[in-house]
Every structure is written in structure tokens, then in C-alpha cells.
Image (spheres, grey):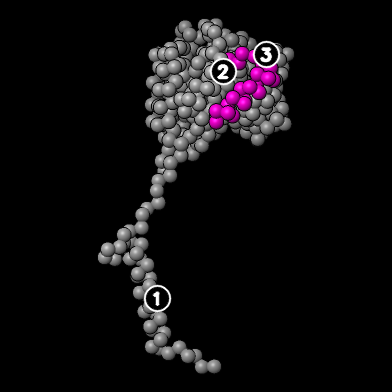
Amino acid sequence: MENSTTPETSGSRRDWLKKSSLLGSALLTGSLVGAKPVAAAPAVTRRLPIAVSTYSYWPLRGPKYPLATVIEDAARIGFDGVEILHRSMEEESVSYMNKLRRLAFDNGLSLPLLSIHQNFLQPDVAKRKTDIEHTYKCINMASQMGIPCVRMNTGSWGTVKNKREGDYYKTGIEPPIEGYTDEDGIKWTIDGMGECLAYAEKEGIVLALENHWGLSSNIDYLLRMYNALKSSPSMGLNVDTGNFVGEPYAGLEKLAPYATIVQAKTYYGGGTFYDKEMDYTRIGKIFQKANYKGFVSLEMEGKEDAKTSVPKSLELLRKAFTFTA
């Protein structure tokens, strides 16, 4: 069959395609008279969830502040969750834990973190085992309350008796027990955390090791321990913005890419243990650059009453951890 396309019709088709292409470009750029340019895609805003730690209301001294009241206050103020400090719990019964879990659910809040204490920096194997067993118990408690993450510590050598006096918070230095070294402490922490992680994996709980002064105030030590354990699906890192010797920004830049959860310190009314200037605009940008998406939990560690300092802290953190791309 002969090709029915003539040079004239073929040329017309080419002209038509060319004109169509130019028309499409004009519509996209708005260059046609009276045409409106296509609007650019709107900026994407990410608002990180902000929790408040019960530590903000009860900093380990005086009468305990009821956790049920913390949960109700947090919902009223506008938080997204409540971090529970184990030592601030009034009891450990199943009915009490269920009450907290239900109260949080009824108020539309998450319970993202259970902060506990243990000490791996003990030469006595039996004492380390006792703290491992304590961690097992706390993992079970977290599971009962529907809390996905438990805050872990390396612990303390116990060689600085009064940390509020002297240079402890200026230097972060706590000498090892005589006859031992930091290398011993690193090994004991890795071994103890390893046992705890094996248990946590069965319960589906994340264990987040914190930069919590002493041994873990050395960021290189902390990352060595983290990297030795990161093959476990339950291994995480809890980054505390205030627990740094001197300015926190260089340390935060090192830790932010590995953060599982963030604890954010404020010091309204003057710090309880120490004062630290915190540029949260800068800190927010550090975590935005690291593409952090998780919870930020407020630990208000100042002397001002929580009724006024906690709402101010929330406003500060909301601005810092709302990212626009």
C-alpha cells in the first residue's frame, strides 16, 4: 500500500507539534498574555512531636508530683507525649501502669520513653548483674505501658562524691576506680548492654544509651559503645542537649545522625546543677540537617516553677523543631 502521507501533510504535522510544544511552555511559564503562571509547590513543614518528662515536675527531690496530673497538664498545654522517669512513679503495680497508659490514650498523648537508671561501671560482676536484672524488669514495665523506648546509662564510677561542687560539670571527668580504666568501663557497658538488648529484642523495646556525664560525656567513647552494639534492632541513642562539657553544638553535630530520641534541657530560673546557654534555633537546624524525625522530650532543669517554665519551654521547642523545607 502506498504511503498516504504527503510532504504537505507531514510538514503540517511537524508545525502543529512545534506549536503545541511552544504553547505548553508558554502555559507553564505564564508568558502568554493574560495567562497565570503555575504556582510553585508549597513548602513542606515538618513539626516534630514534643513530649515532656515527668522529671520537669519532680527533679528527684521533694514530694513526688502525681504522674496522672503531669499527663493531664501535658494534654492541656499542648504536648504530644509524656516521658516517664521511672523514679518518679508512685508505684509499680500493673493496675497503676494500666491507669497511666489509659489516661495518656484518653488524652491523645503518646508515652514515648521510660527513663531508668543502672550502673555498668562496677567491677563486681554480681552488682552489674543486679542492674541488668533491674533493666529486664523495667523493659517489662515499658511493655506493659506501651512505651517503645527505654533510656539507658553507662552508670558512674562513684569517685566524685558531690557532683554539684567542684568542676565535675565543667570537665565531665570522673576518674575510674583505682586499679581500673575507662577501657574496663567501656567493655562492661558493652557486655551489659548486650545482655539487656537480647532481652529487649524479645519484647520489641528499643534501648537508647544516653550521653549522661561521666564515661558517656566522652562522645568518642559513646559512639564506640553504640557502634559495637548497633547490629541489634533494639539498639538506640538518646541525645541529651544539655549533657555536654562546654558548648553543646559540636557534640550534637556528631550525635544527631544516630539519634533515636532527643531530650532537650531548659534552665528557666537558673539551673539546678549548672547553667548552660542553649541556642535552640541552632540546635533545631542541626537536627534538621541530620533528617531527625523522632520525639523531642523536654527536661526542664531550672529552678522556676514548672507551671510557668514548662509552657515557656514548649513554645521554645515548638519554634526550634518545626522544620520548613
Give the mark nearer the N terminus: 1 vs 3.
Answer: 1
Residue 87 placed where, x, y %?
Answer: 60, 14
Q: Is residue 96 magenta?
A: yes
Residue 200 picture location, percent across and down: 69, 28
**Badge 2 is on which residue?**
67
Label 1 vs label 2, nearer the camera: 2
> In the rendered view, does 149 fall on the left or right side of 136?
left
Separation of marks 1 and 2 at Cα, in angstroms: 70 Å
The image shows residue 193 at horizontal and vertical percentages of 66, 25
Q: Is residue 181 above or below residue 206?
A: above
Decide which of tag 1 and tag 2 comes sooner along the chain: 1
Q: Amino acid at mark 3?
A: Pro
Cα gap from disc 2 to disc 3, whole angstroms: 36 Å
For the residues bearing labels 1 and 2, Cβ distance under 8 angstroms: no
**Which quarter shows the C terminus?**
top left
**Magenta-highlighted residues:** 88-108
